[in-house]
Amino acid sequence: MTANPLDRSGGDAWAADRAPAIEASDPPNPMLVIISGPSGVGKDTIIEALQRRGHLPAYHYVVTCTTRPRRANEIDGVSYKFVSVSAFLAMRDAGELLEANEVHGNWYGTPRAGVRDALARGQHAILKIDVQGAEVVKRLVPAALLIFVLPPSLETLVEHLKARRTESAEQLEIRQRNAALELARKDDYDYVVVNQENRVDATAENIEQIISQEERRGPRQVTV
């Protein structure tokens, strides 16, 4: 992980008041941005907060395909693209997915066309993917910007998983075990952002400021 001079040991991983403001006149520098972290850390909520902050058309949120059942609060094609196992494997075998991984007994994958089209339009392609998928994408696209979302503590993460009430006891145990392993991967990322309790808007602001700073560093050679 690249050292971040704006890290603060006592809280968020970014000091927004010391970062350059985003200007509409900035030249386009499309990036592949990966927002990742363990299950239950709040990735979906962070994406929703980013969407509320605007950035269209600069940001394009690529919708992940998954074979897991849709939850009551999720919208097909918005939260995820829900597909059958056979349809998912057909897409994978046809090379239509940038990455495909089986996580917690379900398949997840990123549509390659969604990423390519966004970058071709000069948009940042924003991916919300699991730690395994992020590893694959970084290997395939070394210029990708990786942001790891960290919970305030492992105990907080476990409480979030329990509060969702969307997994069986066995599934919950697997997610907890995997979370501890995934947290150990944070140093593989370019930036780490702590998603403090009840401060998701601050987390979203931290992430957009990271993107802004990296955009100003100059073009990344992204080939998908």
Image (cartoon, rainbow, N blue to C red):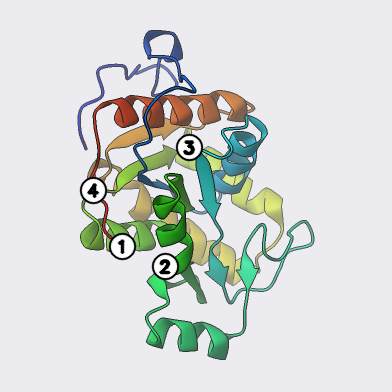
Is residue 116 depicted above or below 206 in this figure? below
Q: Are marks 3 and 2 in contact (CB under 8 Å)?
A: no
According to the picture, the residue beneath numbered tag 2 turns out to be 112
Please give left or right for residue 54 compared with residue 130 in the image: right
- Mark 2 or mark 1, earlier in chain: 2
Residue 141: give its label: none
Is residue 198 depicted above or below 81 in this figure? above
In the image, which is nearer the foreground, mark 1 or mark 4? 1
Q: Are marks 4 and 2 in contact (CB under 8 Å)?
A: no
According to the picture, the residue beneath numbered tag 4 turns out to be 143
- Mark 4 or mark 3, earlier in chain: 4
Residue 151: give its label: 3
Q: Give SS at disc 2.
A: helix
Q: Nearer the viewer, residue 115 or 75?
A: 115
Q: Amino acid at mark 1?
A: Val
Image quarter where the N terminus lies is top left
Counting from the top left corner in percent of width and height, residue 168 is at 65, 69
Q: Are marks 2 and 1 in contact (CB under 8 Å)?
A: yes
According to the picture, the residue beneath numbered tag 1 turns out to be 224
Q: Give SS at disc 3.
A: loop
- Mark 1 or mark 3, earlier in chain: 3
* Quarter residue 140 falls in: bottom left
